[in-house]
């Protein structure tokens, strides 16, 4: 294959990925604006092509009837599809996929709820230095879900995640500070 043809193929593949990424970002933006019809129109073709985030969004659309008729069995099918893809990536070592799996396991979307399995995936991702894994694990300690409740350990993990740049940890710490008020000093 000539160098010119190779460059054309690489350029076409890059453009195709950029279009997919753009459609997903545009679809998510439409979803956030509650323009669900546009979100479905942009995201569904990506889900059909196996884009994991798009598959997850399709599950959400069908679960809540956003831009499509509410259809819990269809939602479950999309969630299971996303879960299967994320599980493959997690088993291959992807910390992000491990965190996504844990999220699905703690909510029971498409799979039976299993907080203990979620904790295992989060610990694996945390061992790889994933800040979002520390944040999610911290929240589980605060709530006592899948681990013994330990607000101090949860806060420690959330602070570690926040220091590593996790915006999710910042949000959780803010919420925690509102929930945990120091006892008034008695004199």
Image (cartoon, rainbow, N blue to C red):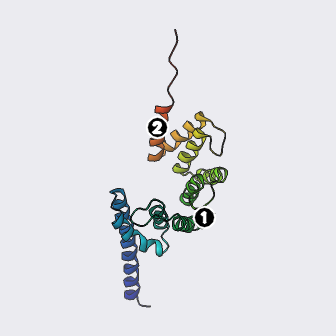
Give the left or right position of residue 28, taking residue 109 as reference.
Answer: left
Gap in angstroms between the C-alphas marked 1 and 2: 30 Å
User: Which of the labelled discs sits on residue 78, or is there none?
Assistant: none
Which residue is labeled 2 in the image? Answer: 175
Kindly tell me whether residue 166 is visible in this rendering.
Answer: no
Q: Which of label 1 and label 2 is nearer to you?
A: 2
Disc with the residue nearer the chain's start (1 vs 2): 1
Kindly tell me whether residue 184 is visible in this rendering.
Answer: yes
109 or 146, nearer to the observer: 109
Residue at x 37% of width, y 79% of height? 11
Question: How many circles with numbers are drawn on the protein?
Answer: 2
* Residue 125, percent from left and from top: 59, 54
Q: Residues within 10 Å of mark 1 (few under 14, many from 20)?
A: some
Residue at x 41% of width, y 67% of height? 68
29 or 70, nearer to the observer: 70
Residue at x 35% of width, y 66% of height? 37
* Residue 111, percent from left and from top: 61, 60
The image shows residue 159, relative to residue 107, as above or below, that is above
187 or 106, nearer to the observer: 106
The image quarter in which residue 22 lies? bottom left
* Residue 47, percent from left and from top: 46, 71
Mark 1 secondary-structure assignment:
helix
Quick check: marks 1 and 2 in contact, CB under 8 Å? Answer: no
Mark 2 secondary-structure assignment:
helix
Give the left or right position of residue 142, taking residue 176 as reference.
Answer: right
The image shows residue 10, relative to residue 24, as above or below, that is below
Quick one: which residue is furthest to the top in this view? 187
Which residue is labeled 1 in the image? Answer: 87
Give the left or right position of residue 175, taking residue 125 as reference.
Answer: left
Indicate the quadrant containing the N terminus: top left, top right, bottom left or bottom right: bottom left
Q: Residues within 10 Å of mark 2 (few under 14, many from 20)?
A: few
Give the left or right position of residue 33, taking residue 143 as reference.
Answer: left
């Amino acid at each position: 294959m000539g160098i010119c043809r190779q460059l054309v193929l690489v350029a076409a593949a890059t453009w195709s990925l950029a279009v997919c990424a753009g459609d997903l970002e545009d679809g998510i933006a439409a979803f956030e604006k509650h323009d669900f019809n546009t979100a479905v129109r942009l995201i569904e073709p990506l889900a059909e092509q196996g884009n994991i985030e798009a598959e997850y969004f399709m599950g959400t659309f069908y679960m809540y009837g956003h831009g499509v008729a509410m259809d819990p069995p269809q939602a479950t099918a999309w969630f299971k599809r996303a879960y299967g893809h994320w599980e493959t990536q997690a088993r291959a070592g992807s910390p992000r996929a491990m965190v996504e799996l844990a999220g699905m396991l703690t909510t029971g979307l498409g799979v039976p709820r299993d907080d203990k399995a979620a904790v295992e995936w989060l610990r694996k991702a945390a061992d790889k230095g994933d800040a979002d894994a520390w944040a999610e694990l911290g929240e589980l300690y605060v709530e006592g879900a899948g681990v013994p409740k330990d607000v101090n350990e949860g806060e420690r993990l959330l602070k570690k995640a926040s220091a590593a740049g996790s915006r999710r940890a910042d949000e959780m710490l803010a919420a925690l500070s509102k929930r945990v008020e120091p006892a008034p000093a008695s004199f």
